[in-house]
Amino acid sequence: MEATSLSFKENARRAMGDETLQKALGFARTGFQDKRAAAAARLPEFDDLRDAAKAIKDHTLEHLDVYLEIFEQRVIEQGGKVHWARDAAEARAIILRLCKGAGARSVTKSKSMISEEIGLNEALEAQKIRCVETDLGEYIVQLAGETPSHILAPAIHMTKDRVSALFAEAHGTAPVDEPEALLAEARHALRQRYFEADVGITGANFLIAETGSVVLVTNEGNAELTQGLPRMHIALASIEKVVPTLEEACVLLRVLARSATGQEFSAYTTLLTGPKRPADLDGPTSFHVVLLDNGRGGMLGTEFQDILRCIRCGACMNHCPVYLATGGHAYGWVYPGPMGAVLTPSFIGIEKAHHLPNASTFCGRCEQVCPMRIPLPKMMRHWREEQFKRKLSPATGRYGLKLWAFAAKRPALYHLGAKVAIGLLCLLGGKRGRFRRLPLASGWTGSRDFPAPQGSTFQAQWRARRDRR
Amino acid sequence: MSGEARDAVLGRLRRALGRGPRTPDELRRKLLARLAAPQPVLIPARGNLELEGRIRLFIAQANAVQTEVLRVGRYADLPDAAVDYLRRSSLPLQLVMATDPLLRRADWAATLLEIRHGRPEDRDPVGLTTAFAGIAETGTLMLLSSPETPTTLAFLPEISIIVLPAVRVLRAYEDGLRALREERGAMPRSVNFVTGPSRSGDIEQTIQLGAHGPRRLLVLLVDELPDGSPQPDA
């Protein structure tokens, strides 16, 4: 996927003028936030579960090498195969090789953000292998030739009129209007694709070291038909998805559904272990797991290790004032919102994504709702420091910061400077007490007045009050 | 390619974690021992109830996610319950059914139902299979794949009917997993936790039922003890 993260500012401006998108994001604000809050309130142990979930992932990351080796061994014992990929190109090559080996002409896929990360659909289509997305939102986005704008609700930016037009064109049917009828139409169209498919490709929510199982979570049941009907199942998973035991996965599952959609539990949670047993009547005859690193190993042991706890629930973006104003596409790559602002620079390089860690007011809501207690603002700050070091931010900003830092380390100078500036601004602000325009502050004054300081500095007022007492 | 990639990925992790070129045997043994004796981490207290309380919680939680639950006294009553349900819902009296021995305790031939056994096809309207356990905490069904209970029975047909022995309504997922380890030893190909019929909110955030899996989900909860099953609250 071609990243447009460097155009974040223009992307965001366009998104904020897009009425349809703004309406769709309005739904997200009330829908996701209220449901999560209600689900959390229903479970007295919710916060303790978050602590337990964090501890489980921290333990796993500290022993990631060993758990991955054990997971691999268990998959092999169950008759499956494990493939390792250092990067996107290797992962694509492995999957193409498996598909060709199976003589595949048609592939179904259930939602996998990692497959977006490696650009899998394009690679399959280039080899004349038809790849059909089965998650309803992904299917809609695929028909439109777009990319997901939310990691849970890929088509969150689209209205039903748009979906109706897309379906009428793709299915050659009369346009229908009701969401129920649209769903029935997609169900019917995708049924045939499930039966035609030679290979089913899924992601993985978790991998279980204890049993060599792949865990899939959906609400639609599309993952079950995607992996259960074709003769080959390929699960594409990044290396940090492993957890030690089934019991520990239960803890993560309990916080996942509640944080994501506010459900007590997603409709379908499936544990897959190896291929079809000889006497079974259904299931794939071959079972493959592709383990993708793609830069994650490099984050281990650094200030970005904590983001490897992420379980992709989407709570951070559902509660982010910036995401809710701009939508996901503005972020310009696979992962949007606060988690995207941390991950994208790691994956595509800070020089191609340095606006993203700045797309935050540091209000801290993402960290407040993150079920894995990932310090997202802290990590965005790390990226801002990196951006500063590499001189990626505008020179005026950097010199301004240096000047400020020089003064801030010298209190007497700082107080004097503040006193002079405040006095000057107070004088210039005049009777109206505000500025329409101010040099170097057009970012502020472009859309609102800048209030002029009133009187003396904070320190001076503090001293005056203390003396009065 | 894969061997080289494997060494590179694992090598990088080992370096980041400050280990040598190989994983120390002692550490590996320690972690294997940890896996061999999985400990529940934290289970919500919600399901800590006697059997009848768990059943009530299961039904309430299942109903909250649009699962219908009918309580049936004996296995022999199952065919009539299924027929009643299908008639009331104006659905065809046509079933594709699991071959679980539990279901053979009823005389299905005595009804008007048209029945086939085994794996469902695309056009089969109703699938009937058995659950390994019910989870009171969230009204969840735990299904296992086996030659007698093919997974697609609960996913392909528009109507899914699941038979669940009432005595198997357990507190939490962990209890179901423990029972699986104790009774089956090995993992089946597929373990499905099912909480309500299939749904999607992908069109304008409005929840619609029946996305790819079943549009309706009926649980037939049977009070009669299945032969050889553990006693309540054993």
Image (tube, coloured by chain):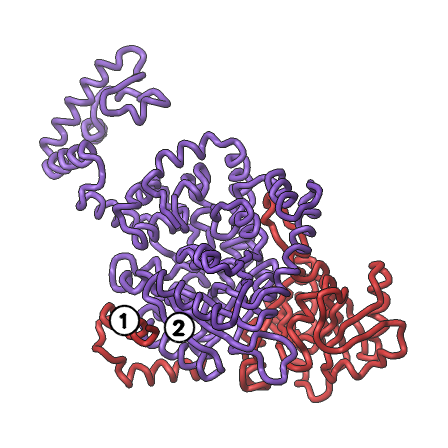
Chain colours: A purple, B red
- Residue B155 location in percent, x, y? 66, 66
Residue B215, located in which quarter of the rendered image? bottom right
Same chain for marks 2 and 1?
no
Name the kind of residue labelled 1 in the image: Ala
Q: Which mark is residue B91?
A: none
Residue B119, located in which quarter of the rendered image? bottom right
Tell me how far mark 2 sits from mark 1, CA to CA: 13 Å
Q: Chain of mark 2?
A: A
Please give the residue where the numbered disc 1 appears in the rendered image: B8
Residue sitting at x 37%, y 33%:
A10
Residue B206 position (above or below residue A205): above
Residue A304 position (above or below residue B119): above
Horizontal side, residue A224 vs residue A101: left or right: right
Residue sitting at x 31%, y 16%:
A436
- Residue A247 location in percent, x, y? 48, 73
Horizontal side, residue A228 vs residue A303: left or right: right
Q: Nearer the viewer, residue A346 or B163?
A: A346
Q: Secondary structure at mark 1?
A: helix
Residue A395, located in which quarter of the rendered image? top left
Number of callouts in the render? 2
Please give the residue where the numbered disc 2 appears in the rendered image: A83
Q: Which residue, as the protein is rendered here, is positioned at the far top?
A: A431
Labels 2 & 1 near each other (Cβ < 8 A):
no
- Residue B18 location in percent, x, y? 21, 72
The answer to whether residue A87 shows anywhere in this view is yes
Q: Chain of mark 1?
A: B
Residue sitting at x 36%, y 60%:
A88
Name the kind of residue labelled 2 in the image: His
Residue A146 position (above or below residue B123): above
- Residue A294 location in percent, x, y? 33, 61
Q: Secondary structure at mark 2?
A: strand
Q: Residues within 10 Å of mark 1 (few under 14, many from 20)?
A: some
